[in-house]
Image: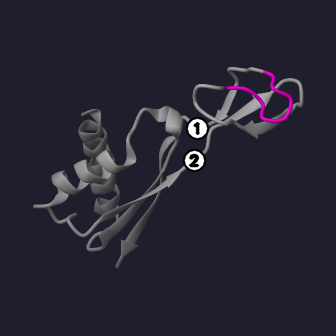
């Protein structure tokens, strides 16, 4: 379960940021995760809860925004969503492409800090 190591890395970032705002508490960490990132959001949340349960960060919740897969269609010259991961083609003209504009994200976007 690689989500555990990812959760540990996120916790390290949370701890570092919390150290800059003492005595404040981090109450939430916001992430953007795309379906092509290889991360299962529910598994990441479970792993994060597991590693924070006996720490000062046990009150910190993980808020995940799942981003859609968008491709850049070379024919339409615009970004389009796809019907499925297996069919990476423009939903308007049908042109297949491997030019992914969105969907690989695994980003920590924000943290809520309570002073």
Q: In this view, does 70 lie to the left or right of 106?
A: right
Q: Which residue is drawn at 89% across and 24% down?
A: 75
On the image, numbered disc 1 is attached to which residue?
103
Above or below 75: residue 55: below
Q: Closest to the observer: 41 or 13?
A: 41
Hey, which quadrant is residue 38 in on the image? Answer: top left
Q: Is residue 91 left or right of residue 102?
A: right
Quadrant, the N terminus:
top left
Mark number displayed over residue 62: none
Q: Residue at x 27, y 55 (%)?
A: 15
In the image, residue 76 lies in the stretch drawn in magenta? no
In the image, residue 91 lies in the stretch drawn in magenta? yes
* Residue 94 position within the rendered picture, expressed as x and y whole percent measured from the top left: 81, 26
Q: Which residue is drawn at 47% across and 34% down?
A: 37
Hey, which quadrant is residue 82 in on the image? Answer: top right
User: Which contiguous range is marked in magenta?
Assistant: 88-95
* Residue 89 position within the rendered picture, expressed as x and y whole percent measured from the top left: 73, 26
Q: Earlier in the sequence, mark 2 or mark 1?
A: 2
Q: In this view, does 47 lie to the left or right of 87?
A: left
Hey, which quadrant is residue 18 in on the image? Answer: bottom left
Of all residues, the one furthest to the left in this rendering is: 54
Q: Is residue 1 left or right of residue 78?
A: left
Disc 2 crowd rating (10 Å Cα; few below 14, some 14-19, many 20+) is some
Q: Which residue is drawn at 28% across and 60% down?
A: 19
Instruction: Give the spatial CA distance, label 2 vs label 1.
Output: 6 Å
Labels 2 & 1 near each other (Cβ < 8 A): yes
On the image, numbered disc 2 is attached to which residue?
67
- Give the prevailing secondary structure in the magenta stretch: loop
Of all residues, the one furthest to the bottom in this rendering is: 115
């Amino acid at each position: 379960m690689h989500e555990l190591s990812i959760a540990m890395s996120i916790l390290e970032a949370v701890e570092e940021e919390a150290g800059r705002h003492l005595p404040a508490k981090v109450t939430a960490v916001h992430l953007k995760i795309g379906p092509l990132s290889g991360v299962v959001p529910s598994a990441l949340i479970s792993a994060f809860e597991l590693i924070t349960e006996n720490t000062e960060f046990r009150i910190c919740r993980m808020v995940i925004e799942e981003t859609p897969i968008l491709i850049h269609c070379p024919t339409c010259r615009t970004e389009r969503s796809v019907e499925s991961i297996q069919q990476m083609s423009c939903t308007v003209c049908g042109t297949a492409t491997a030019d992914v504009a969105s969907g690989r994200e695994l980003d920590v976007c924000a943290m809520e800090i309570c002073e």
